[in-house]
Amino acid sequence: MKGKVVLVTGANGGLGTHVTQAFLNAGATVIGVSRKIQQSDFNSPVFTALPAEISTAAGAKSMVDSVVARFGRLDVVAHTVGGFAGGQSIAQTDDATFQRMFDLNLNSTFYLLRAVLPAMRKTGNGRIIAIGSRAALEPGPGVGAYSASKAAMVSLIRTVALENKDAGLTANVILPGTIDTPANRKAIPHADVSKWVQPANIASLITWLAGDAGKDVNGAVIPVYGNDV
Ligand SMILES: NC(=O)c1ccc[n+]([C@@H]2O[C@H](COP(=O)([O-])OP(=O)(O)OC[C@H]3O[C@@H](n4cnc5c(N)ncnc54)[C@H](OP(=O)(O)O)[C@@H]3O)[C@@H](O)[C@H]2O)c1
């Protein structure tokens, strides 16, 4: 990953922290984006914190423009921004929850992809890895807005894979089951965490997809369900 410019969205999140660290360990130049990201979140001279709101078109575009202006290129995007809402049936789901799920999970992805593609096509070797959810393929009761937003996101990524293979670009989406994050441990205190997915393992998969060996994997929808299969 030496010489590669990598953008990680959600870089200070439960998963994004591991993804950012994995790319730093691999020698990449990493730009970490979130609304509240700070330079002190990662102790590395090749890490740059870039605070941004990416669920708006203007926010995503100005963030990407500043990355390209400063670093001159963009090789890899690992998109981990997303969020969950549950507990309401479709009949109960209010407009604000539905809108929030689509802003966070789908619109952020669309605005990000549209903004990064021109620069990434120029590298001839671009890699996009996005984080969906198991719920994209396996909707359950009470998570309809979340599942629908992640399902649409999978469709977007697969379309980008088809539209940009002529430029040597790959786009893949990983569908995790429940991830072993501090937030999940707090929210579900008595869970059997041995069934959960380790975030470091997802980070390894992302860096593999971003590396030379990952060049032949394009348009893949990759389930990572831990021991809860
Ligand atoms: N946790 C799970 O069990 C699980 C399971 C399946 C799929 N997933 C998916 O995996 C991904 C990561 O999950 P996670 O648990 O790591 O989530 P998380 O801890 O909530 O992290 C979300 C990250 O996104 C950033 N963010 C949120 N809204 C943003 C916005 N509008 N603009 C810019 N940054 C924003 C947050 O930082 P700021 O607050 O600083 O903006 C944070 O860095 C998500 O897509 C999630 O849907 C998670």
Image (cartoon, rainbow, N blue to C red):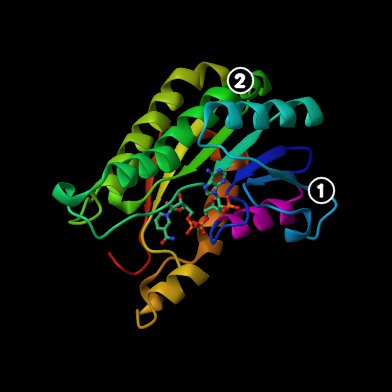
Element marked by disc 1? loop
Mark 2 vs mark 1, foreground winner is 1
User: Would residue 45 be found to the left or right of residue 229 on screen?
Assistant: right
User: Would residue 58 be found to the left or right of residue 88 on screen?
Assistant: right
Locate residue 78, reporting x and y percent.
57, 43
From what the image shows, is residue 69 above or below residue 6? above
Residue plotted at (39% across, 29% down): 156
Q: Residue 211, located in which quarter of the rendered image?
A: top right
Q: Which residue is mark 1?
A: 46
Residue plotted at (60% across, 49% down): 207
- Answer whether residue 114 is visible to the viewer in this image: yes
Locate residue 191, reporting x and y percent.
35, 79
From what the image shows, is residue 212 above or below residue 83? above
Give the residue type that dot 2 points to. Answer: Arg
Is residue 50 a member of the stretch shown in magenta? Answer: no
Q: Residues within 10 Å of mark 2 (few under 14, many from 20)?
A: many
Nearer the observer, 68 or 220: 68
Check if mark 2's residue and mark 1's residue have beta carbons within 8 Å.
Answer: no
Q: Residues within 10 Å of mark 1 (few under 14, many from 20)?
A: few
Give the residue type that dot 1 points to. Answer: Val
Q: Which residues are magenta?
A: 16-27
Look at the magenta stretch and give its main secondary structure. helix
Query: If the image is split into quadrants, where does the N terminus sit?
Result: top right
Query: Is label 2's Cβ within 8 Å of ligand 1?
Result: no
Res. 121 mark: 2
Locate residue 208, reporting x and y percent.
57, 48
Sooner in the amino-acid sequence: mark 2 or mark 1: 1
Residue plotted at (45% across, 25% down): 160
Query: Is label 1's Cβ within 8 Å of ligand 1?
Result: no
Element marked by disc 2? helix
Locate residue 123, reporting x and y percent.
67, 23
From what the image shows, is residue 93 above or below residue 215? below
